[in-house]
Amino acid sequence: MDMRSGVGRSIVYGFASTLMLTLLVTPAPAQSPKLSNVDLCDGKDRSSSNAQIIGCTALIKSGVNNAQVLASAYNNRGNAFNGKERYDLAIRDYSESIKLNPTFAKPFNNRGVAYKKDGELDRAINDFDAAINIDPNYANAFANRGEIYQTKGDYSRALKDFDEAIRLQPAVGSLWNERCWTHALAGDLQAALNDCNESLRLEPNTAATFDSRGLAYLKLGQWDLAIADYNSALQLNPKLPTALYGRGFARLKTGDPTRGKADVAAAKSVDQNIVTEFARYGPQ
């Protein structure tokens, strides 16, 4: 799997890192009789991280003498551990994958995702740098690094990385949304609206993008448009704290204290840090 990590707002997504095996099709665990360990390690049984761990572990212990296959197996098992939030085990497996195949960009990117989730942002940036040095067309690595620069408040570097990710994958709506959100945080609100509109054209029913555009309208003082976008976001994700708080903020500005306070309280019940977080976004 090629992992993409969001900073609290976006979705982790990716593609399987396929094991190039033709001779080592080993028996599958009893719970998945139709799948070989190769298939399980490749993540074809998407219902269970445990099955992927079992499949990859069996391959690693099988004695296969192929560094590329082993590197993929460790990488894929690392993804399964990442999905279970066992970042220590994920990092260990990605590191083993890198030792076996130092020119394999995916485990550098994926270890960066694990470091980011574990709060080690500088280590994550180093890994994304390494992934990009190996594969300069690695859109996910640019996007992942951009999200960390965004978290650090380095909007200029974040925007450069999102520019490159969009150049490489212009049809991925979530990338346009990440750049929209960054423009909104940086105060370039018309650019934010342009990017969010393109994101919604590509992926029309995405709560995070309505949330991003809602923030742009909020910072422009266009309360009714902000409320409309937050309504759309909350129809898709009723517990999205930034949308609840943003709608509450806008309702208070329009003289609707009862519903405004109710939204703010609902946002706090989902995320106790939402007031501090939203203050960083800069709406007045």
Image (cartoon, rainbow, N blue to C red):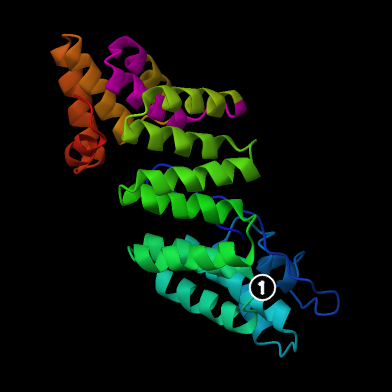
31 vs 66: above or below: above
**From this viewpoint, which residue is outermost toward the right?**
23
Which stretch is magenta? Answer: 202-227
Answer with left or right where residue 131 lies relative to residue 237: right
Inspect the magenta stretch and tell me whether residue 253 lies in it.
no
Which residue appears at 71% of the width and 90% of the height? 63
Secondary structure beneath label 1: helix
Q: In this orientation, does residue 255 appear?
A: yes
Crowd band around label 1 with a 10 angstrom C-alpha radius: few (<14), some (14–19), many (20+): many
Inspect the magenta stretch and tell me whether residue 215 lies in it.
yes
Tell me residue 199's x, y (percent): 54, 29
In the rendered image, which quarter contains the C terminus?
A: top left
- Front one among 142 and 248: 142
Image-quadrant location for residue 237: top left
125 vs 265: above or below: below
Which residue appears at 77% of the width and 64% of the height? 34
